[in-house]
């Protein structure tokens, strides 16, 4: 008897269920552990896909077009990324990073609202075309992938043209969608702030206000400044 391959929707549901289950288990130890568990589910589910459903991708080290776009993140991803950078960057690189966060946040907040998503601004975590926080990068950075470097470059050259996209792999996208939705559901269920915040503004607030992580740990809203990007806009 032959078995039909699972539909894309079935992949999304399977991964979401595994992610919610594993995130719940991780959350018993803490939110960062829950995040790592969700990342593990996503990575192992990617390996379960047939080879042609997960690559070959055009993404390469040093190709950073997508790191000039706005990224939405949950607070625990911001704190995990900051912790990784604190542990790995030397003092000069840390100073460079924090200055880049402050200046990029200021630039973003000075932009007209309709230009925030159509202006290329390098992520402050980026240096010399590389992500300095790669092992701790947010889930949306992990999920972003492309089959065409040329399409990414065209979109980068014409940031105002929102009709330009880039080809992706549907099954791979569904694994990430499922993994993220399961993670967010478990986080919310446990009472943690699972809102989506724009990465740069969240990094800036986390660096300026140590109470942000206390609020998060107390299951309150972590970031209180006016959002530069509303959830659902990206
Ligand atoms: S966190 Fe890393 S991968 Fe994500 S946008 Fe910034 S530089 Fe790129």
Image (tube, rainbow, N blue to C red):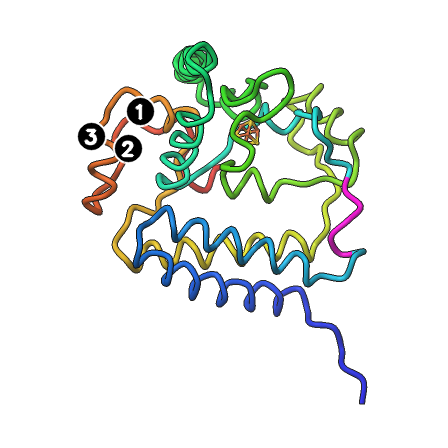
Q: Quadrant of the N terminus?
A: bottom right
Residue at x-position 67% and y-position 26%: 161
Label 2: how many residues lie within 10 Å, few (<14), some (14-19) or many (20+)? many
The answer to whether residue 106 of the structure is visible from this angle is: no
Q: Nearer the viewer, residue 30 or 163?
A: 30
Q: Tags 2 and 1 in contact by the CB under 8 Å rule?
A: yes
Q: Quadrant of the rendered structure where residue 102 is?
A: top left
Query: Residue 32 placed where, x, y %?
Result: 37, 46
Q: Please give the range of residues in magenta.
A: 53-57
Query: Residue 216 placed where, x, y %?
Result: 25, 41
Task: Please give the residue where the numbered disc 1 appears in the rendered image.
Answer: 205
Residue at x-position 51% and y-position 23%: 125
Mark 1 or mark 3, which has the lower sequence index?
1
Q: Residue furthest bottom?
A: 1
Q: Secondary structure at mark 3?
A: helix
Alpha carbon of mark 2 to alpha carbon of mark 3: how far? 9 Å
Label 1: how many residues lie within 10 Å, few (<14), some (14-19) or many (20+)? many
Query: Residue 72 placed where, x, y %?
Result: 46, 37
Alpha carbon of mark 2 to alpha carbon of mark 1: how far? 7 Å
Q: Secondary structure at mark 2?
A: loop
Viewed as shown, does residue 206 lie left or right of 153?
left
Disc 3 C-beta below 8 A from ligand 1: no
Q: Nearer the viewer, residue 205 or 127?
A: 127
Disc 2 C-beta below 8 A from ligand 1: no
Q: Is residue 111 above or below residue 86?
A: above
Task: Please give the residue where the numbered disc 2 appears in the rendered image.
Answer: 223
Mark 2 or mark 1, which has the lower sequence index?
1
């Amino acid at each position: 008897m032959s078995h039909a391959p699972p539909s894309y929707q079935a992949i999304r549901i399977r991964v979401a269920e595994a992610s919610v289950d594993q995130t719940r288990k991780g959350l018993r130890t803490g939110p960062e552990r829950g995040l790592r568990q969700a990342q593990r589910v996503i990575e192992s589910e990617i390996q379960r896909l047939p080879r042609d459903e997960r690559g070959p991708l055009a993404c390469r080290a040093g190709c950073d077009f997508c790191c000039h776009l706005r990224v939405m993140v949950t607070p625990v991803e911001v704190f995990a990324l900051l912790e990784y950078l604190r542990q790995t960057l030397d003092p000069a690189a840390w100073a460079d990073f924090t200055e880049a966060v402050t200046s990029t946040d200021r630039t973003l907040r000075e932009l007209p609202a309709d230009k925030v998503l159509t202006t290329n601004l390098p992520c402050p975590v980026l240096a010399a075309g590389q992500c300095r926080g790669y092992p701790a990068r947010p889930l949306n950075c992990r999920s972003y992938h492309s089959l065409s470097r040329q399409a990414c470059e065209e979109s980068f050259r014409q940031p105002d043209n929102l009709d330009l996209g880039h080809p992706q792999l549907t099954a791979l996208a569904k694994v990430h969608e499922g993994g993220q939705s399961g993670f967010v559901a478990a986080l919310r269920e446990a009472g943690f702030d699972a809102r989506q915040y724009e990465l740069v503004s969240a990094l800036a607030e986390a660096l300026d206000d140590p109470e942000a992580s206390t609020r998060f740990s107390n299951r309150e809203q972590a970031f209180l400044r006016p959002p530069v990007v509303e959830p659902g806009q990206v």
